[in-house]
Amino acid sequence: MSKAAAPRLELASADPSIAQEMARWLSHLGAERRLSPKTLEAYGRDLRQCLDFLSNHWGERVTLARFAALEATDVRAFMAMRRADDIAGRSLMRALAGLRSFGRFLEREGKGKVGALSAIRAPKVAKSLPKPLPMASAKRLADADERAGEERETWILARDAAVMALLYGSGLRISEALGLKRREVPRPGEGDVLIVTGKGNKTRMVPVLQNVLELVQEYVSMCPYPQPAEGPIFVGARGGPLSPRIIQLAMERLRGALGLPDSATPHALRHSFATHLLSRGGDLRAIQELLGHSSLSTTQVYTGIDSERLLEVYASAHPRR
């Protein structure tokens, strides 16, 4: 493994050897595993909380040797402490995943094997199925006229409608839509696909409807700011990068106007894209590719598909039926 220098960390609850290995671990996850900055921040925070807990639990600063000798009861005590703070199951799962990753890193580096971490079962997490929007409502969200009564500039209403149309029409994450550069979005009649960069910096190709491109072009023609080819296609009121929060606020206004529930969020449009494709006979694996999911089970949860629907697909498509 590369011995590239990592930024120094200061940990009050652990000695410098742990701090050094933690810094190298996070650097490795960012450079080689290409985890997002938010994930790295969460993993670092979880490990710091664990080290703080262990220091209080043991009554001494945590050393590498002491951490390597971690026992299952120590890990369970830490998890129990976090659960007592009303931490959600998914956050506990992430914390355990981060600790295991750090343990594997230490083992690969020859700094000891933290066997206790693999002996702990991950906490159960209740699956909350997404709530797709009705098809008619999803389409209305991309209609700038629905917000005609607002005291907002026309180009801003057109911009928000174009973003909503991309989320529903191509199943994009909001970060993917707002990350598009001007050169990456074809003009109407000049292309029908987008190359988007998703989680883990992975790129994928997704189709885009011509009427969606027309909405984007309508916004572009109204936008008062320059749009260089390498710049973001969607900009804020002052010409800078558009914040996801602005689109979330636009959705909140539309919820009231259209009588939609609080579950109607920008991300719900991505769920709706997947669910509506499936309901019209779309192939689950093709939808998985369009969404950029690495796991088919994630797509299954996204679309709310149940065992009955899977059996229907099996019964209608199996060659031996």
Image (cartoon, rainbow, N blue to C red):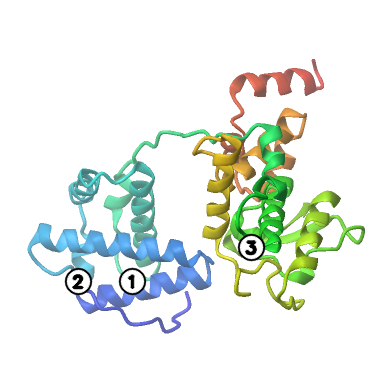
The crowding category of the residue bearing disc 1, from other C-alpha atoms within 10 Å (few below 14, some 14 to 19, many at least 20), is many
How many residues crowd mark 3 within 10 Å: few (<14), some (14–19), many (20+)?
many
**Mark 3 or mark 1: whose residue is earlier in sequence:** 1
What SS does tag 2 mark? Answer: loop
Residue on which the image places disc 3: 178
Q: Which mark is residue 14?
A: 2
Residue 252: horizontal and vertical position, in percent?
53, 47
Mark 1 belongs to which amino acid?
Answer: Met
Instruction: Give whichever of 151, 227 is nearer the camera.
Output: 151
Name the N-terminal-most of marks 2 and 3.
Answer: 2
Q: Contact (CB < 8 A) between labels 2 and 1? A: yes
Task: Please determine whether, in this image, residue 74 is positioned above or below residue 274.
Answer: below
Q: Is residue 21 left or right of residue 167?
A: left
Label 2 and label 1: CA atoms lie apart by 11 Å
Disc nearest the viewer among 3 and 1? 3
Kindly check if marks 3 and 1 are in contact, taking CB atoms under 8 A apart as contact.
no
- Residue 314 showing in the rendered view: yes
Q: What residue is shown at x 18% (from left), y 64% (from top)?
A: 66
Q: CA distance from mark 3 to mark 1?
A: 33 Å
**Numbered disc in front, either 2 or 3:** 3
Q: Which mark sits nearer the N-terminus, 2 or 1? A: 2
